[in-house]
Amino acid sequence: MSRAAKTIRDEATALKPAPANVRVIPAAAPPVRRKRRSRLWIAAPVLLAVLGAGYYAWSQYGAEPATAMITQVVARGDIEDCVTAVGTLDAIDSVDAGAQVSGQLKSLHVEIGDKVEQNQLVAEIDPATIENRIEIDQAELANLEAQLVSKKAQLVLKQANIERQRNLVATNSVSQSTLDQAVADHAAAAADVDAISAQIRKQKATLAGDKVDLGYTKIYAPMAGTIVANPAKEGQTLNANQTTPTIVTIADLSTMTVKAQVSEADVGKLKIGMDAYFTLLGQPGKRFTGKLRQIQPMPDTENNVVLYYALFDVPNPTGELMMSMSAQVFFVEAAAKDVLVVPSAAIHANGDGKAQVTVVTPSGATEARAVEVGIRNRVSAEIVSGLEEGDRIVVDAASASTGDSARNNRSRGIRMPPMF
């Protein structure tokens, strides 16, 4: 039976009069459908949350991107245009004090770091071997001198024999051959004297050489300075027959030389006498200044990179500069102090190729203004004309959506939980 027919039947039954003995009880009212109403109350907050999320997404990601400008106030400062390089520190003058004779290093009177004066005794080699040679030389010399006396006496005797034989020949007492023999004996005696004299001179030279070697057993400082190395140790046997062994190295640390490696692309910018300075890793804010002294013509090649050495000297009165320190070197091509300085990124070319900047007016608008640029480096530029101190210029103009896009890109990798 359909629902409509059932309804008509129920209404007809209700209109029939009830029997007298039957009590009619009114039917109860149909129950209200609270289940549907409760669902509406649950769905309303969810709907509101969805609408709020949609509005937030539209305001954050659907709005037009705003333009963000990075500005800076024009101020005065110092500027430099430099050729940069790296270098190392070395002593302006150094020398190796070595042994010229062989022997055992008997004593070493200095240590690394000691300051020495010129001609100061720094080391001694055992002189016993050389002293023995000198003793032998002196004895040999005395022997030769005694032989010379004997040979000279023989020469005098030979000379007297010649005179005697000549008188006898004059009286026909002896033959001429006897006189000739006497002359020959005299000549031989004179030659013996000359030979012994030559041996004496040779022996004297040998003795003098050994005395010089004896002097070499004492090593003196050839210059004033600081002991920076002592490769030889006490008790070590030194062999000076082939090479001169180094005992100590003395360096003048009162003035240091900076050896900077400059690339072949920049070496043409350097000029002898130009200002230069360097900073150290431990003291980045302190400058040590000098003037370019020399550009060595022979370069070094490292990994197919050609590097030339540029040298300049700096005083070192306090001794804070040490050998082999690393230095960040700057050769100053141009410099100016107390001038208007702006970031190089703020300068761009107009249609005519001239420099211009974008200036923010007091009303907040922007306008392009032509400027004359002086000294310029990678970071800053000098403004000769076109701007005043206190002007605000645009350094960079970027869309604010750049950061939002980055955030969106990062958000793509994050899975958001379902809202419902």
Image (cartoon, grey):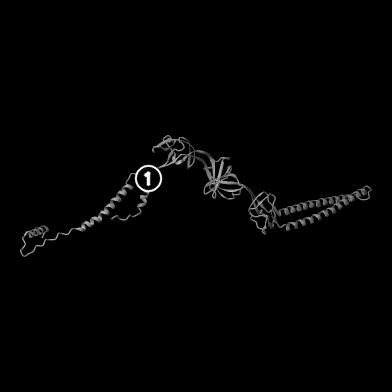
Residue 208 locus on image (x, y percent): 76, 52
Looking at the rendered structure, the secondary structure element under dot 1 is loop
From the viewer's side, name the closer residue of 403 and 158. Answer: 403
268, above or below 282, in the image: above
The three-letter code of the residue at mark 1 reads Ala
Residue 68 placement, left or right of 105 = left
Q: Position of residue 272 (x, y in %)?
A: 58, 40
Q: Nearer the viewer, residue 200 or 105?
A: 105
Q: Residue at x 52, y 44 (%)?
A: 84
Local packing at callout 1 (Cα closer than 10 Å; few below 14, some 14-19, many 20+) is some
| Left or right: 94 in relation to 263 | right
Position in image of residue 69 (x %, y %):
40, 42
Extreme residue in the bottom direction: 21
Residue 67 occupies quadrant? top left
Residue under numbered circle 1: 400
Q: Quadrant of the C terminus?
A: bottom left
Q: Position of residue 292 (x, y in %)?
A: 58, 42
Q: Quadrant of residue 136?
A: bottom right
Number of labels in the image equals 1
In the image, what residue occupies the spot 56% across and 44% down? 277
Can you tell which quarter of the image residue 46 is in? bottom left
In the visual, does 200 lie left or right of 26?
Answer: right
Q: Nearer the viewer, residue 290 or 336?
A: 336
Q: Quadrant of the N terminus?
A: bottom left
